[in-house]
């Protein structure tokens, strides 16, 4: 990822003789937030940029030259997302077409990535599967991050893989839910329309930096830092969650769907 903005911020900070922590204190931000901006993983909000300008006595340069969303490629956004996902203390996922990446089994991930267009080589698919499984390792910690998954019934009924793989994937989510590692709710077909129909969504909260959201669609992925946008997406998630089945009913539907694919307890 081109990181001219982050590099320039670091140069200005070093010229001023400040550590990241000292700049964070002056700008009323957190050190980790400053580190993410300098590394190109996050874009500051307009208010943060104004605070950085004041802290560094740089006029309005940082405010005036904030990168726009279109300035960063989708792949670059996802690379940043991989890092931020590992640091989150709360993750809320919405899956529209596929199970969220951190919940995918090896077989399911392989099937989904194998259906990519344009097609990728077997070697490239295997590399992506390994990356996806590495992401799922955050669930090995029994407590953090707290994970909620809101699953559209569409992904359960439209097989993205063979029957055995679908049954295994669904039961994997059932197991994670029954053991208390995640909380999963199904948004049923009975809900005709809902505010999450446009794309998948991941919401992340952190210990020492502002929350963010990640949306993804066809050839499009964005990390959203803007507080107003993140708040809107959080509200959309909450509204959709209010129409989802309760936990016990969601588990019952997941089990029934797995049985339809041939799973037997």
Image (cartoon, helix red, strand yellow):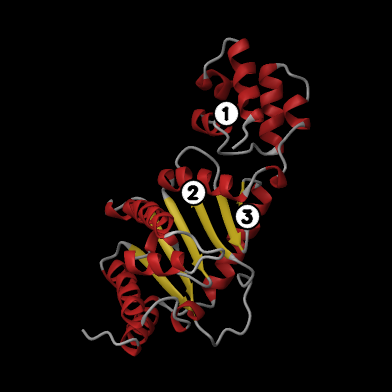
At which x and y percent is residue 143? 30, 52
* Quadrant of the frame with the N terminus: top right
Q: Residues within 10 Å of mark 3 (few under 14, many from 20)?
A: some
In space, the residues marked 3 and 2 are separated at their CA atoms by 12 Å
At which x and y percent is residue 216? 59, 60
Tell whether 264 sits left or right of 161. Answer: left
* Quadrant of the frame with the C terminus: bottom left
Q: Which residue is mark 2?
A: 205
Viewer-closest of 255 and 229: 255
In space, the residues marked 1 and 2 are separated at their CA atoms by 20 Å
Does dot 3 land on a helix, a strand or a loop? helix
Viewer-closest of 89 and 5: 5
Q: Which residue is mark 3?
A: 231
Tell whether 139 sits left or right of 67. Answer: left
Does dot 1 land on a helix, a strand or a loop? helix
The disc, 1 or 3, on the residue closer to the chain's N-terminal end is 1
Q: Nearer the viewer, mark 1 or mark 3?
A: 1
Question: In this rendering, is residue 224 above or below 176?
Answer: above
Q: Nearer the viewer, mark 1 or mark 2?
A: 1
Viewer-closest of 130 and 153: 130
Where residue 123 sits, quadrant-wise, is bottom left
In space, the residues marked 1 and 3 are separated at their CA atoms by 25 Å
Tell whether 27 sits left or right of 177. Answer: right
Q: Quick check: marks 3 and 2 in contact, CB under 8 Å?
A: no
At which x and y percent is residue 88? 44, 47
The disc, 3 or 2, on the residue closer to the chain's N-terminal end is 2
Q: Residue at x 72, y 28 (%)?
A: 62
Q: Residue at x 45, y 59 (%)?
A: 121
Q: Which residue is mark 1?
A: 38
Question: In this rendering, is residue 75 above or below 24?
Answer: below
């Amino acid at each position: 990822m081109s990181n001219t903005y982050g590099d320039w911020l670091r140069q200005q900070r070093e010229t001023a003789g400040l550590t990241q922590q000292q700049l964070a204190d002056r700008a009323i931000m957190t050190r980790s937030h400053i580190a993410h901006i300098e590394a190109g993983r996050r874009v500051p909000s307009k208010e943060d940029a104004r605070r950085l300008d004041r802290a560094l006595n740089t006029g309005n340069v940082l405010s005036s030259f904030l990168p726009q969303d279109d300035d960063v490629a989708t792949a670059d956004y996802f690379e940043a997302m991989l890092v931020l996902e590992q640091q989150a203390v709360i993750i809320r996922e919405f899956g529209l077409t596929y199970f969220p990446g951190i919940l995918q089994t090896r077989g399911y991930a392989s099937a989904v990535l194998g259906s990519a267009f344009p097609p990728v080589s077997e070697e490239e698919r295997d590399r992506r599967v390994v990356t996806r499984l590495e992401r799922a390792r955050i669930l090995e910690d029994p407590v953090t991050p707290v994970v909620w998954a809101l699953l559209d019934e569409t992904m359960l009924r439209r097989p993205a893989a063979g029957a055995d793989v679908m049954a295994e994937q669904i039961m994997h989510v059932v197991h994670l839910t029954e053991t208390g590692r995640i909380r999963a709710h199904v948004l049923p077909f009975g809900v005709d329309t809902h505010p999450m129909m446009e794309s998948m969504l991941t919401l992340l909260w952190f210990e020492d930096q502002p929350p963010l959201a990640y949306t993804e669609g066809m050839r499009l992925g964005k990390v959203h830092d803007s507080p107003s946008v993140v708040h809107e997406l959080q509200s959309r998630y909450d509204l959709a969650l209010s129409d989802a089945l309760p936990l016990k009913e969601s588990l019952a539907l997941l089990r029934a769907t797995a049985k339809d694919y041939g799973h037997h307890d």
